Image (cartoon, rainbow, N blue to C red):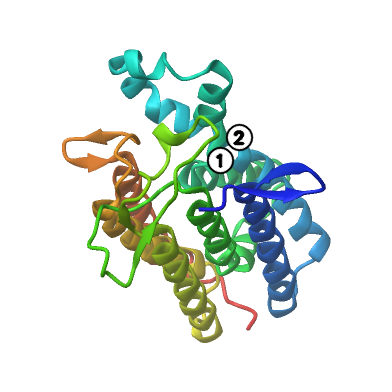
Amino acid sequence: MCPYIHIFGHDIHTYGIMIIVGMSVALGIAAIQCKFYDYSRQEALLTALLAIAGGMAGAILLRPIIRLPEIIINWERYSRVPVGDFFSWLFGELVFYGGLIGGAITVILFCRHFKMSVIPISDIYAPALPLGHAFGRLGCLFAGCCYGIEVSPSNPLAIIYPERTDGLAAFSAPAATPVLALPLIEACGNILIACIVFLFQRKSKTAGRGIAVYGILYSILRFTLEFFRGDLVRGVYGGISTSQIISMVVITASILWFIFIPRKQRAVI
């Protein structure tokens, strides 16, 4: 675990650094994609900035909404956490699905207002999203969040975290316990998805389907990995988590998008 990087006497959150790196990588990939789709980099950057703003809002707000029932039920436990640490924990972790939903809504509203097609934007960012997300998951690995179930110490994918001393030990991976390095697994899965989407776009003759392929593949990946999560305080209803419910919605929407996207929309490449 490496939740902080010490620079010039200051502690900087590793998670935040990896989020920034992920965004930078995604913007770089999008800039490259603009060449293939003959799309303005200025418009792509503008929509990206709007998506980041909407995505940050969604990523920050979804976690408190999910955790609210658990906090109410187990208030005795949470009331013992210092106020500053409690709010840092409640609002300090970004939820990817919240960011994806918030960013998508923002871009769609923007495009509708200015009568722009959302399809070129979806093509440009289809492989960039999973690649940027991979760096975010590496941030989770360093921070000790989104960890996996307890496994045998001999498991090649096991990771053992040390004790935290910043007041957030109750909300991080258990110390001295081998757990599945789930963030690393998801990061690798996202990189693979980015490659598949990129190759699919090179072969596809219909614009807009790349984002559907991404939605289908990531939903399957996330739904499956949720069974191996060790941090249960994230909303579980009827045996499945909130993220699995969202995954089912996303995969359904992605399949419908893939099937019913206008055939007249032809890819440039």
The answer to whether the residue labelled 1 contacts the one labelled 2, judged by CB atoms less than 8 Å apart, is: yes
Q: Which of 85 and 20 lies nearest the eye of the viewer? A: 85
Q: Position of residue 67 (x, y in %)?
A: 38, 27
Question: In the image, 124: left or right of 226?
Answer: right
Q: Which of 84 and 116 lies nearest the eye of the viewer? A: 84
Quadrant of the image occupied by residue 118: bottom right
Q: Which residue has dot 2 on it? A: 57
Question: In the image, 135: left or right of 51?
Answer: left
For mark 1, give the secondary structure.
helix
| Residue 218 in the image: above or below residue 149 | below
Residue flagged by tag 2: what amino acid is it? Answer: Ala
At horizontal 54% and vertical 16% (from top left) the residue drawn is 83
At horizontal 33% and vertical 34% (from top left) the residue drawn is 233
| Residue 203 in the image: above or below residue 182 | below
Quadrant of the image occupied by residue 85: top right
Q: Position of residue 128 (x, y in %)?
A: 60, 66
Any part of residue 126 in sight: yes
- In which quadrant will I find the C terminus? bottom right
Q: Which residue has dot 1 on it? A: 102
Distance from disc 1 to disc 2, alpha carbons, whole Å, reads 7 Å
